[in-house]
Each structure stands twice: as structure tokens, then as C-alpha cells.
Image (tube, rainbow, N blue to C red):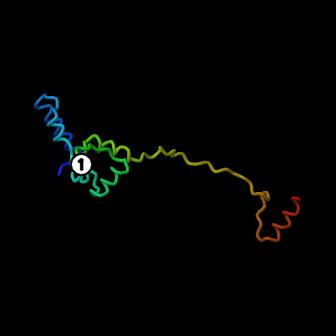
Amino acid sequence: MYGLVELKIMTAEFNNFTGAIPNEAMILDCLLTPAKAARILGISKKLLHELCRQRKLEYVQIGSRRRFTQEQLQAFIDSQTIRQPAIDKKPSKRLDCPRKGGEKSFGNGANLRKEMKQWR
């Protein structure tokens, strides 16, 4: 129905229009049902309740019912946002390390064995 951004805009416009501080009735109107909260987050109601049981998503308990505020949903979204570290785009310098056998390149294992005997 309405997304989180739309609800915030509508609440702000109402407050600007009336010039009033939200009272208890307005606060209760801002509480979202699990179905609406799940729709805003793009998840199922079952997953929403599971996140509540795991204490990953805060909620308001009214009797036996759970309700959600816009701020609680935004806090959950922020907590689940993965921020990628800045990537250094400079090309990596290749280290010019000589091979263990020196600058020589060995074609077969026999020459390598001879070279290794000289190291001892």
C-alpha cells in the first residue's frame, strides 16, 4: 500500500499542515500491523515474526499483538545494510623475485636435480 518513505512524507505534511505535536491517537495511527510492516520490508509475515523472536527487529507489544513504528523498520534496514569498504584502485606492484634456482629456466627435472645438488 504505502512504503516507508511515503508514510514519513504523509506524517510530515500532516504535522506541517496542523502545526500540532502528535498526540496518542496519532501515534497509534502510525503503528503498522505485521502485514504492512512485512510488505514494506518485502518479506513474509512468518519471517517478520521470526525476526522478532530472534530480537533482530524491535516492535511494540500491545496486549498480545505486535505493532511496528517507521523508526523501528528504518533501524532494522540500517542494521542490515552492508557497507563495502573503499577499494584502492591503484594497480598492485608486481614484485620481481628471482626463482629459487637463480635466473636459469629448467626445461626438465634432470637439470633441476643437478642444480639442486650444487646448492648443498
Q: What residue is rendered at 25% in x and 48% in y?
A: 66
Q: Residue 15, relative to residue 86: is it above or below?
A: above
Circle count: 1
Q: In this view of the protein, which residue sits in the foreground, 74 or 116?
A: 74
Residue at the limit of the structure toward the left, as seen here:
18
Q: What residue is rendered at 77% in x and 71% in y?
A: 108
Give the side of residue 14 with respect to residue 87, left or right.
left
Q: Quadrant of residue 50?
A: bottom left
Q: Residue 106, relative to residue 42: is it above or below?
A: below
Q: What residue is rendered at 30% in x and 43% in y?
A: 74
Q: Position of residue 59 (x, y in %)?
A: 29, 44
Amino acid, disc 1: Ser
Element assignment for label 1: loop
Q: Position of residue 89 (x, y in %)?
A: 51, 46
Q: What residue is rendered at 11% in x and 32% in y?
A: 17
- Assign the C terminus to one quadrant of the image: bottom right
Q: Position of residue 64 (x, y in %)?
A: 24, 48
Reading the image, the residue beneath label 1 is 64
Give the side of residue 37 with respect to residue 26, left or right.
right
